[in-house]
Amino acid sequence: MLNIRNLHASVEGKRILNGLNLEVKSGEVHAIMGPNGSGKSTLAQVLAGREAFEVTEGSVDWDGVDLLAMPTEERARAGLFLAFQYPVEIPGVSNAYFLKAAVNAIRRQRGLDEYDAMDFLARVKAEMKAVGMKEEFLYRSVNEGFSGGEKKRNEILQMALLEPRLAVLDETDSGLDIDALKIVAEGVNRLRSPERSMIVITHYQRLLDYIVPDQVHVLSEGRVVRSGGRELALELEEHGYGWIKTEPAPAAAGAQGARP
Amino acid sequence: MSTIDTWVGRHHERAASLPGAALPWLLRRRADAIARFAELGWPTTRLEPWRHTSLSFLEQHELQAPESAPHPAATLAAVRSEFGDGGHWLVFVDGRFERTLSVLGGLPAGVVCTPLSEALSKHAEAVEAAFGTADEAASPYALNLALCTDGAFVRLARGTALGAPLHLVFIGATGAADTHLRNLIVAEANTEASIIEHHLGGGSTLGTTVTLVHTAQDARITHLKLQQQDATAIHLAQIKAEQARGSYFASHSLSFGARLARNDIHTRFDGEGCETLLNGLYHVDGRRHVDHHTLIEHASPLGISREYYRGLVDDNARGVFSGRIIVAQDAQRTDAVQRCDNLLLSRMAEADARPELEIYADDVKCAHGATVGQMDEDALFYLRTRGIDEIRARQLLTYAFAAEVLDRIALASLRSSARATLLARLPGGALLEELL
């Protein structure tokens, strides 16, 4: 279980998260919505360990471990995966090499044998087929010259290969047409399991037509201001985010993250 | 003491024993050359082309042959294992041709490949025409002409091609405190060859090397220079190409060693439709210094030049690039691209990248850019979020930055050998070997 308590974070002196509380149980999918600048992506980056974001207060407990005390790569090896909103292009590093290095880093941590070239290729080709990626993408540099949709598929491919315990998807739907969106959603749905939690960050309700969350949270000014079931997303779709801001934020932390 | 007078004295001492001492034209050129060197001395930063690289310390510098060095055969064996046993090998130790280490069988008919010291008697006229003079080059290359002991003479008769690469290996061992080598490559019309210079060893010596490349019409010459000298050596090198109509000349300069390495690389398009690729990679650390000073003269129309340099600059080291491109008034429809990118690997590292474009024609495409930067933090974070250690991620990104230069080496076998050589020098390289 992931338990975020009173999380405060800032970047370059600017406070972005202001006492965020969130609980995600094993096997649950939580959607996080909110207007631009509400802190959605900052939450994702802080969970993944980006050093540019300074955590000034609060805690993140992940199955009894202090997540914030771990360096980025250890979080990844312990089973945290962040699907980037803007996947980074890495010229000169082939996708095949990158994927293999990542998979083997995580397999080592889990006490599994590293894949050799043959086993790895067999596995990666099967996963690529499932997300509709052509094999040539293995031999191109990581994300270099990929279209927006191709980059996001590459993220889902990595998620499938790395088999995380906790996946954070940061606006994976942004910039995707409906077909690409469906493929991404299928990828996510295929990975839903009782051992795996997911936090799906999105600006639009659209993605939640395909990925049905257990809970929806609305972020505003770095805090969860509303939590509810899937119907909360539909409400947002209808009314926009304007009405959220006009309501006073709930005073008690206990009101947040509660089951609908 | 290496004062100018000492060098003039060395010329007098050695003149009689230098190869070609019986050739009047060569005696005259050597005499002119040492006179030019005596007049100019070592370049100082007061000269614009040497603004970032002064050689004035050489006035007082102690040169020393290495007290001990690996056996040249062992040094050669290491290179041959990296570059494969095929190809033709001309090996020089301390500036002298080593016949027993060289492998020159199976050259195609019409191809001459021989030490310069022998070519001076066997191919005297061709050598005289290709030898070069001292009146244009910077003073160290005049000194080279005055003192050169040997080098390679390569001539490709019209229509011939060297199927396998020709390796010229220059090893500094315990025999000399200064070496001066001159390579002459004469490619007649419609010829093709790949020539690789390896520079190794050298201790605290001064080495000058001049490589003159004559490419006739439609000739295609690829030159790769791999400089991996000891970190105390001083390496001064000129590569100069003259290109006739429709010819192609590629220079790949991989500068990994030496305390100070200076490369003056110059090509001139003397006919229409010439093409050149000047491609380079340097890796400097410690207090070492590397300087690439390039000049592309678009003297004729329809020329295409591509110039790409990348530098990895670590510790207190310094990397310098200056790229001058001159497009003459009638060199219309010239297409030139120049880029230089540096990755600084420490706070104290320094890189200078200076493009200089002089364009006198009006119908040209010229693009240039230069960057000096640090590692991409976004890429580093991305790799770490995938479970890859920070140290390994840094090594991977460093390698990837450099390896893009090597991707431009057209011959696959050379490309993979060059990659292996790069990996062997970079920290963590062994772990990245799967990249090949």
Image (cartoon, grey):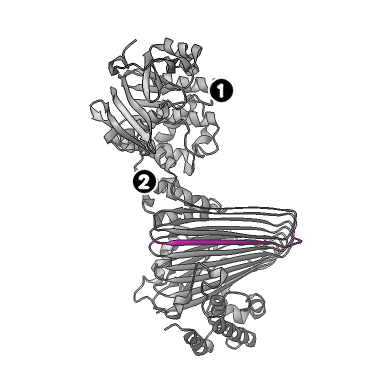
Comparing B178 with A43, the one in front is A43
CB under 8 Å between callouts 1 and 2?
no
Comparing A214 with B231, the one in front is A214
Residue at mark 2: B392
Residue B319 drawn in magenta: yes
Tell me, for residue B169, which label it has, or none. none
Find residue B204 and report its image quarter.
bottom left
Comparing B192 with B272, the one in front is B272
For the stretch drawn in magenta, the main secondary structure is strand
Residue A148 drawn in magenta: no
Find residue B184 and report its image quarter.
bottom right
Q: Which residue is pictured at 51% across the width and 19% down the height?
A: A182
Residue numbers of the magenta segment = B316-331
Q: Is residue A110 visible?
A: no
Residue A155: give x, y in percent of width and height: 45, 30
Please name the amino acid that badge 1 sits on: Asp
Q: Which residue is pictured at 39% across the width and 78% down the height?
A: B64
Q: Is residue B356 visible?
A: yes
- Quadrant of the frame with the C terminus of chain A: top left
Please name the amino acid that badge 2 sits on: Arg
Could you classify mark 1 by the number of other residues whose Cα lies within 10 Å: few (under 14), some (14-19), or many (20 or more)? few
Residue B352: give x, y in percent of width and height: 50, 59
- Quadrant of the frame with the N terminus of chain A: top left
Residue furthest left in the image: A64
Tell me, for residue A177, which label it has, or none. 1
Using residue B330 as the reference point, say whether residue B75 is left or right of it: left
